[in-house]
Image (tube, helix red, strand yellow):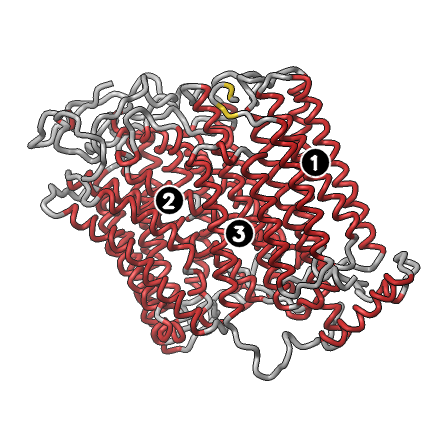
Amino acid sequence: MSATTTAAGKHQLPREHYLNATYGIRSWLLTTDHKRIALLYLASVTFFFFVGGIFATLIRIHLLTPNGLLVTPETYNKLFTMHGVAMIFFFLIPSIPAILGNFLIPIMIGAKDLAFPKINLLSWYIYLVGGSFVLYSFATGGLDTGWTFYTPLSSIYSNSAVTPAVIGIFINGFSSILTGLNFLVTVHTMRAPGMTWFRLPLFVWAHYATSLIMILGTPVIAITLLLAGLERMFHFGFFNPAYGGDPILFQHLFWFYSHPAVYIMILPAMGVISEIIPTFARKPIFGYSFIAASSIGIAVIGFIVWAHHMFLTGEATYAAIAFSFLSYLVAIPSAVKVFNWTSTLYKGSVSYDTPMLYALGFIGLFTIGGLTGLFLACLGLDIHLHDTYFVIAHFHYIMVGGAVMGYVGGLHFWWPKITGRLYPEFLARSAAIILFIGFNLTFFPQFILGGLGMPRRYHNYPPEFQVLNVMSTAGASILALGYLLPMVYLTWSMRYGKVAGPNPWPSTGLEWKTDSPPLTENFHETPVVDWEPYDFVHRPDLGLAGAKAPGKLAPAHGDD
Amino acid sequence: MHRTGELYGQYKTLEQQKETASLGMWIFLVQEILFFGGIFLAYAINRHLYPTAFGISGNMLSLPLGFANTVVLIASSFTMAMSVWSAQTSKKQLVTIFLILTLILGCVFLGVKVKEYKDKFDHHLIPGHGFDITYCSKNPTACNLEGKDLANEIKEIEEGIELEGGETALNAHAQLYFSLYFGMTGLHALHMIIGAGLLLWLILDARKGRFDVNYNTPVENVGLYWHFVDIVWIFLFPLLYLINRHLA
Amino acid sequence: MSENGHHVVSPKLYAAILAALLVGTWITVQAAKIDLGPWNIVLALFIATVKMSLVILFFMHGKYSPKRTQLVIISGFFWLAIMLGLTMTDYKTRSPEPSRTSYPPAITIHRA
């Protein structure tokens, strides 16, 4: 199947592809095709995004007035808890890996499927079972412990439906673990001939690093929640001071996973950005091996900084200094990426297609979020900023301004590949800008609120903070519009969008050499890789100006 | 699941398929190391904080039963390894025999555990209502304690109460030990039950002669899992049963 | 001896490992009955580590596995060490609460 150039006449959908290969509900619910499983995840992850979003809406409406507009204090505790649990465990962690990762990784490495397709399907069902337990918890009294489940509130004193929630998150952890396992083994053993490690797309490197964290970190949250659950159900005394147990032990165990978990949430988004930027700058990415190494570096260093969440728990000064220093250290590989992305833009032929708008937004917002993390890692500052809205703004800049924009941008970038169709460009760019404006209006005031001392997880606040809170809620309504628009036009485009052809942007990865949508087996025959990644120059088939003939194959080393 | 040594669609060679399955199982085991590691960490911290209570509580466990269980599990690892060898050398009947032996030894282990748990229940050592670390020293006949054992026990408890600053404190920390005991051995037993299920599945396939030199990946991989569960017990035994045995 | 390129370990070696494991178990029980103070736990963990290594190397064919597998195994233990070690640094460097002499005070447990 030869790759066609962009806008070179009308394209036609391929006759046979993964969406029409078989029909019927059983062919979807019992599929082992990684692409169909990705779409199954798309549906369920979007559902949980709505669930978390509804709670966020209620929170922001409630905070319009200083004494709380909507709910009782106890219910408010439940709102922010359920918002956190739904968003973190059932949206952010699975989103890019389970949807885009599942869809793209086999194609990007030239394989027919993941290493363990049935386990891939099992992961989705496990996700559903875990999600059901959590939804049951939400419906039968909710949760009011905070998504952090600190003991002894969660294990002894809380009157909310903690047990089913803890069971649900425990089960969901195995979905994560199995996905990570699948990715790791796939990248090791299923690469096509010629696809050496340093020819892998950076998207794959990012997911490899993410999978390392999933395997090494998730079991620890599993055992932690199991222990808290046992304490709640059977009065075992692990974290109960009455028995001599230590609540701080819970925090150590909890954060050993939950800090690396934030890297599970951001690394895949960084992988998406690393694919979008070279495509719309029409230039090879700057510093390929540094970006690849920085992904692994973030994954590794991310495991030794967790106690920066515990600076105010009576940690010894020496331990605190060590963790503070290490937390500064982990910023370095992230900064490497940001520098490399911007350097890629330099002297590139930059266009502002929708995915690029999201990518550029990501770079700016992630940088702000990351820099404010350094504020928090500073011991003296953290004493004042801990548990304030500054922290909330910090992580929302990274998680929403970063991870979600990466997710939405990635969805747009690969939408033609997944569905065979293009979305309406003007509407999409408008939605991106609306989202960007709404996001900043929602969360920038929260930095100021935090600096002024407004505590997080409080259902009310002093009247002088009202203006900023109202701004934040107003921003949230614009943000919501920015989310709803893509849901509408992307759905519309599945039926009525312009047919995209194999390589609409154009881009250089292996996935853009397949049909849009691809065959169930991805390739007509196993590709043999003999080109370097992000090589826009030696690809006359892309139809870009200044293209050269494919040169003699350089010895495979992968440095750019 | 696999019925013969056939090639699944996403693989190019049987070798790739085998390599993939093996790597997958090893990565799964790494994940299990971190899983058990969390509760081992809880154990380590609490033992560090309450050495006296942990010593007294550990001596409540039956050393002969614990030792016997350790021997049983190690033997079952041997029979499991032999089952893999039988498959690799195409001795199909031996594969089944060794798998059955492994399963039997595993069941013996679980049976002993049931007895041990029952004893804890009888001796008021289940965390929660009714927990009393001093029960056996006060009701020696109920615990089959007599003579030197009883004298040692009473002495240990008395010293413990003094060191911990009261019977309530001793009871509290002892409950912490037993929470960890049931948590750790319970989790281990659950993994053994899963292992027994896997062995049963293998036995059913092995009886049909499915495993030989060309295809023995399931036996090998279940073996890896079984050995891992054995290793967890290799650590559980000294940590739970051998704390202050010089006092007993 | 190897079949199909995969190393086959001989039953003799397996039996030797079995014997070593049983001896190790017996030693660790006997050692526990002697009062070595803080060294009891060190010795017990050392013996357990040796036994574990024998199981991994020979029963699980770790010695004959590709380097990649060996790296996977070592990483698992390395990460476990990070979790145990770094957490212990917090506990080891805490100073005791000033108003009490022992950790923690005896409290009455209220049963509902």
Answer with mark 2 or mark 3, whichever residue precedes in sequence: 2
Q: Which residue is mark 1?
A: B75
Looking at the rendered structure, whether the residues under marks 2 and 1 are on a common chain is answered as: no
**Label ID, residue A220:** 3
The residue under label 1 is which amino acid type?
Answer: Ala
Q: Nearer the viewer, mark 2 or mark 1?
A: 1
Secondary structure beneath dot 1 equals: helix
Q: Nearer the viewer, residue A436 or A481?
A: A436
The residue marked by circle 1 belongs to what chain?
A: B
The x, y position of residue A229, in whole percent, is 63, 55
Picture coordinates of residue A183 (x, y %)? 42, 36
Q: Give the answer, above or below, for where A79 lies relative to A291.
A: below
Q: Separation of disc 2 and disc 3 at Cα?
A: 18 Å
Specify whether residue A147 is in view: no
Q: Position of residue A162 (x, y in %)?
A: 61, 56
Q: Residues within 10 Å of mark 2 (few under 14, many from 20)?
A: many
Question: What's the residue at 67%, 77% (across, down)?
Answer: C105
In this image, B131 relative to A497: left or right? Answer: right
Tell which subunit mark 3 falls on.
Answer: A
Q: Is residue A50 left or right of residue A247?
A: left
* Residue A10 at x, y percent in the picture: 19, 23
The amino acid type, in three-letter code, at marker 2 is: Ala
Q: Which residue is mark 2?
A: A209
Q: Nearer the viewer, residue B156 or C79?
A: B156
